[in-house]
């Protein structure tokens, strides 16, 4: 019996087929995949456990992209790691407080090895306002939760524009759902026009602000950000937070970009794509279509570039999501 989270050859075949045939019955999928109905159902259960398949209210399954499924599975783990690092840094700061002489000498040498807890909405706003106004080089913001509160947008806009006018590089990362919120879209458009970079991604683990790569603001409770924040200057935690931001930033889509890969392929391109989607290698595709392997390789490379895919499997998933295989 397979482990619940294992992706074997059968699960891979079923996943590809569910991308192409989301409304097929399990018996039909089993026939297409050359499996028994029980094997196909077991594969679907494993894919569901990994978040790669979700049940559709109208019947059948919805295939989820590997990137989104990974974000859904790993975000809680990343949040737990982040909270543990904050706890460790807070404990370190409390221990340091036992030695007045040590803290005095440390503050004279460097003020960037501490963590401070700030409570109360007015105090939080004052700290963020001070950090923004004294920022000189960069501000990286991670903003989960889709569309943002309109009052918060009105308060942030003039401060961000002032910061950009001083030559500070601002990068802001929203979730994809923010694109459907008109006030957030207006805000992103306005700061982008002023020089900021704004991207979106599927899921973000926590709200976060990183100023000049030397200090960061994180909520103590991601579900109640007004309850309190941690102002972090600890180098180890900051290093982790910067890597976390870059991880999501590199996978983000520019806010001004549409999630579109251009016109759907036709003719030979479409035939090649369809065979790619069912796992055929270039040599087999060339033999089946009566083409040279070199020509097939050129078409495959072009399709993967248009889809922004790093693998043939990822290309098949994205092509299905674009409706190219229907």
Image (cartoon, rainbow, N blue to C red):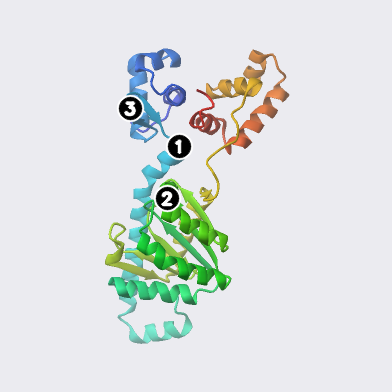
Residue 105, image quadrant: bottom left
Secondary structure of the residue carrying numbered label 3: helix
Between residues 145 and 95, which one lies in front from this camera angle? 145
Query: Looking at the picture, does residue 325 appear above or below residue 234?
Result: above
Q: Which residue is mark 2?
A: 178
Residue under the image location 31 percent in, 58 percent down: 222
Residue placed under numbered mark 1 in the picture: 66
Marks 2 and 3 in Cβ contact (< 8 Å): no
Which residue: 36% across, 52% down?
A: 145
Circle 2 packing at 10 Å, graded few (<14), some (14-19), many (20+), is many
Helix, strand, or loop for circle 1? Answer: helix
In the figure, 287 relative to 119: above or below? above
- Precedes in sequence: disc 3 or disc 1: 3
Residue 294's disc is none
Residue at image point 45% right, 48% down: 179
Residue 267, x across and y down, in percent = 64, 20
Residue 234 visible within the image: yes
Q: In the structure shown, which secondary structural element does the residue marked by tag 2 occupy?
A: helix
Mark 2 or mark 1: name the one nearer the start of the chain: 1
Instruction: Give the quarter of the image for residue 192.
Output: bottom right
Residue 144 placed where, x, y %?
Answer: 39, 54
**Is the residue 229 above or below the residue 301 in the image?**
below
Crowding at label 3, few (<14), some or many (≥20) Cα neighbours within 10 Å? some
Return the residue nearer the eye: 113 or 274.
Answer: 274
Whether residue 253 sits left or right of residue 59 in the image: it is right
Residue at the spot of label 3: 45
């Amino acid at each position: 019996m397979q482990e619940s989270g294992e992706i074997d050859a059968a699960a891979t075949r079923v996943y590809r087929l569910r991308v192409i045939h989301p409304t097929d019955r399990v018996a039909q999928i089993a026939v297409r995949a050359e499996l028994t109905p029980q094997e196909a159902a077991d594969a679907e259960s494993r894919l569901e456990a990994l978040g790669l398949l979700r049940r559709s209210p109208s019947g059948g399954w919805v295939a989820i992209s590997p990137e989104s499924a990974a974000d859904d599975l790993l975000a809680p783990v990343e949040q737990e790691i982040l909270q543990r690092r904050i706890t460790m840094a807070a404990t370190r700061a409390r221990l340091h407080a036992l030695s007045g002489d040590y803290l005095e000498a440390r503050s004279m040498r460097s003020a960037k090895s501490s963590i401070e807890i700030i409570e109360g909405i007015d105090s939080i706003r004052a700290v963020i306002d001070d950090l923004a106004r004294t920022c000189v080089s960069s501000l990286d913001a991670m903003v989960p939760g889709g569309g943002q509160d309109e009052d918060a947008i009105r308060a942030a806009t003039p401060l961000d524009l002032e910061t950009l006018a001083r030559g500070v590089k601002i990068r802001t990362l929203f979730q994809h759902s923010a694109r459907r919120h008109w006030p957030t879209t207006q805000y992103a458009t306005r700061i982008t026009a002023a020089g900021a970079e704004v991207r979106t991604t599927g899921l973000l683990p926590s709200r976060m602000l990183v100023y000049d790569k030397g200090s960061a603001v994180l909520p103590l409770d991601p579900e109640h950000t007004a309850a309190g924040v941690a102002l972090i200057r600890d180098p180890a935690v900051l290093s982790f937070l910067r890597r976390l931001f870059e991880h999501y930033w590199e996978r983000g889509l520019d806010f001004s970009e549409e999630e579109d890969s251009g016109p759907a392929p036709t003719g030979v391109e479409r035939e090649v794509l369809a065979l790619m989607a069912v796992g055929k290698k270039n040599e087999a595709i060339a033999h089946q279509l009566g083409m040279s392997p070199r020509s097939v390789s050129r078409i495959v490379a072009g399709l993967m570039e248009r889809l922004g895919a790093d693998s043939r499997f990822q290309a098949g998933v994205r092509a299905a999501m674009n409706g190219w295989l229907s």
